[in-house]
């Protein structure tokens, strides 16, 4: 049976970096500049012996007539609808922003199976953000660094019971 995980969260938290690490091919563009990726992207993820489909919610970065919040909501709801579980990513260095809270609310309402990932958690600069993230009401955050490949064992442990 195949399993689908949607990576969701506001722009710039590191969703595409994580997608690329899990998929191992550069299917999703990563860039410091906004406006590079679009819509939803699917790939076959490998994490240890786990195999699953992963969806990257991109396209949030693009300037359109529609408000960013409206696009975020639509894309997230689409991805959630396609997925068995969601990995909700925050930037632990930035801490919990109001837009993170909007996402958390969408995910809580959709009552999807949500795993909280505190990304950019390499080094001590992320400690405050990790602690803040408990207040999102989505359980214990999995500390990861998508860029440096840290915390992948903890991510494995969080995903293994689901896949
Ligand atoms: P997305 O908009 O959520 O898809 O975020 P991206 O994957 O495009 O990453 C946004 C920025 O965060 C890029 O400059 C990445 O290099 C950076 N980034 C991603 N993961 C990490 C991480 O684990 N640590 C740090 N310090 N930066 C990261
Ligand atoms: Mg992206």
Image (cartoon, rainbow, N blue to C red):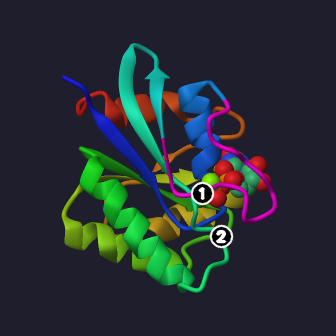
Labelled pair 1, 2 in contact (Cβ < 8 Å): yes
Q: Position of residue 161 (x, y in %)?
A: 23, 30
Query: Which mark is on residue 123?
Result: none
Q: Position of residue 46 (x, y in %)?
A: 47, 21
x 31%, y 37%: residue:
4
Please tell me whether residue 7 belongs to the stretch shown in magenta: no
Q: Position of residue 75 (x, y in %)?
A: 42, 65
Can you tell me whether the CB of the residue at mark 2 lies under 8 Å from the nearest atom of ligand 2? no
Provide the residue designation for mark 2: 62
Up the image or down, 138 lies above or below 51; here it is below
Question: Is 5 placed left or right of 110 in the picture?
Answer: right
Provide the residue designation for mark 1: 38
Up the image or down, 151 lies above or below 59; here it is above
SS under mark 1: loop
x 54%, y 30%: residue:
22
Chain-order first, disc 1 or disc 2: 1
Up the image or down, 147 lies above or below 33; here it is above
Q: Which residues are magenta?
A: 26-41
Magenta region, main secondary structure: loop
x 70%, y 45%: residue:
29
Quarter of the N terminus within the rendering:
top left
Question: Is 156 placed left or right of 139 in the picture?
Answer: right
Q: Is residue 93 visible?
A: yes
The one nearer the camera, 76 or 64, is 64
Up the image or down, 123 lies above or below 151; here it is below
């Amino acid at each position: 049976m195949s399993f689908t995980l949607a990576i969701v969260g506001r722009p710039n938290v590191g969703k595409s970096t994580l997608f690329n690490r899990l998929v191992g091919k550069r299917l999703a563009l990563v860039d410091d500049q906004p406006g590079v990726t679009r819509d939803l992207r699917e790939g076959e993820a490998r994490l240890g012996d786990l195999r699953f489909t992963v969806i990257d919610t991109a396209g949030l970065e693009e300037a359109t007539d529609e408000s960013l919040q409206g696009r975020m909501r639509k894309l997230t709801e689409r991805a959630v609808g396609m997925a068995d579980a969601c990995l909700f990513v925050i930037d632990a260095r930035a801490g919990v922003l109001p837009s993170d809270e909007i996402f958390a609310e969408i995910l809580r309402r959709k009552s999807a199976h949500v795993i909280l990932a505190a990304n950019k958690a390499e080094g001590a600069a992320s400690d405050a953000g990790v602690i803040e993230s408990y207040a999102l009401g989505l359980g214990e955050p999995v500390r990861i660094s998508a860029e440096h490949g840290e915390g992948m064992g903890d991510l494995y442990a969080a995903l293994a019971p689901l896949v």
